[in-house]
Image (tube, grey):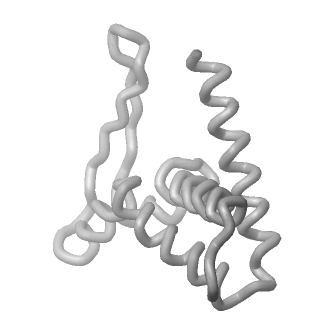
Amino acid sequence: MEGVSWLDLAILVLASFRLTHLIVFDEITAFLRAPFFTEKYETDAAGQLIRHIEFHGEGLRRWLGMLLSCHWCVGIWAAAAVVALYVYVPAAFPLLLLLAVAGAAAVIETKLYTG
């Protein structure tokens, strides 16, 4: 691999962002997190959504729960997976592009609704 273009880098960054969010926060992947922790949300006086996490078990199970609840932690592994797909599985580029477009849409939507 000689170098990564700025466009490819932007696609990798956005794909990694979206994959991380998919794993850590999205309802569609709650089944992945459910064995390791329970999430509850409440709204504070300022109208902000507060996430409360109750971890299940001890040892490896608790550690995996802590990992899956942390967007910084999952982000490293998601980035590694995205880069590995980019480098070693060129046929996966459409999937990375799909994640990138979804990630960009999420950023735009967040900016529109939170000002």
Q: Position of residue 25 (x, y in %)?
A: 50, 48
Q: Return the residue nearer the eye: 20 or 108.
A: 108
Q: How many marks?
A: 0
Task: Say if residue 29 shows up in the picture.
Answer: no
Q: In the rendered view of the protein, which quadrant contains the C terminus?
A: top right
Point 17% across, 75% down: residue: 59
In the displayed structure image, the side of residue 88 where residue 76 appears, left or right:
left
Point 54% across, 62% down: residue: 31
- Residue furthest to the left in view is 59
In the displayed structure image, the side of residue 55 where residue 81 appears, left or right:
right
Q: Quadrant of residue 29?
A: bottom right
Point 71% across, 60% down: residue: 7
Q: Quadrant of residue 46?
A: top left
Q: Quadrant of residue 56?
A: bottom left
Q: In the rendered view of the protein, which quadrant contains the N terminus?
A: bottom right
Q: Return the residue nearer the eye: 34 or 78.
A: 78
Q: Position of residue 3 (x, y in %)?
A: 62, 78
Task: Say if residue 35 shows up in the picture.
Answer: yes
Q: Position of residue 102 (x, y in %)?
A: 73, 50
Point 59% across, 73% down: residue: 82
- Residue furthest to the top in view is 45
In the displayed structure image, the side of residue 33 where residue 2 appears, left or right:
right
- Vertical arrangement, residue 40 with respect to residue 43, above or below: below
Q: Return the residue nearer the eye: 35 or 83.
A: 83
Q: Position of residue 51 (x, y in %)?
A: 36, 36
- Vertical arrangement, residue 42 with respect to residue 12, above or below: above
- Vertical arrangement, residue 99 with respect to residue 48, above or below: below
